[in-house]
Image: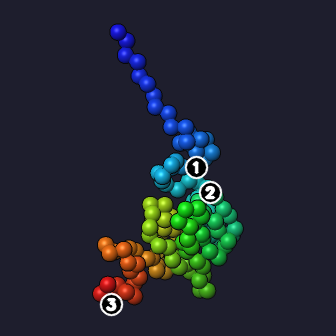
Amino acid sequence: MTDIKIKKIDPLSERLDKAGIKGGAGRFKGLTKKDKKVVDAFYSGKKADSNLLTSTGKTLQKEGMGSQKIATRTKDEGFKITAKMDSKSTQSIVNYINKSFPKDTIKKTVKKKNKGGLLVTPKLAQRGF
């Protein structure tokens, strides 16, 4: 007898891959080249958008499910990261910003969830929360 191998096909994932959307249904595989170009355009103060991110030049916004403001440009030509670290995609965006922007231009006010589900900002962390 010959062994026949059957390949399982996920039509949604195939359609998303053909459309250039990484991840698929509920899976995030990382930033695309277009997403990285949007972050780079934000650094340069230009407008750009992708499926995941939008830059107005002054703000970097994550779109779709869990949309939020990721970073803003400050008055002193620095950047303030205001992201709430609630998903892998947000973490990937902030990691890319930390790697590609000069260190002295970034001010972090990243909000993290503790075990109780409360948002812990740097000011609350200093108070013992």
Q: Position of residue 124 (x, y in %)?
A: 37, 86
- CA separation in Å, label 2 and label 3: 39 Å
Q: Position of residue 55 (x, y in %)?
A: 64, 68
Instruction: State the SS at label 1.
Output: loop
Say which quadrant the N terminus sits in.
top left
Instruction: Specify the label residue 51 is tagged with.
Output: 2
Can you identify the residue that label 1 sits on?
A: 21
Q: Earlier in the sequence, mark 2 or mark 3?
A: 2
Q: Quadrant of residue 112?
A: bottom left
Residue 61 can be seen in this image: yes
Category of crowding for the residue at label 1, using alpha-carbon neighbours closer than 10 angstroms: few (below 14), some (14–19), many (at least 20): some
Q: Position of residue 88 (x, y in %)?
A: 44, 60
Can you identify the residue that label 3 sits on?
A: 127
Q: Earlier in the sequence, mark 3 or mark 1?
A: 1
Say which quadrant the C terminus sits in.
bottom left
Give yes or no for contact between labels 2 and 1 (Cβ–Cβ under 8 Å): yes
Q: Is residue 1 above or below residue 42?
A: above
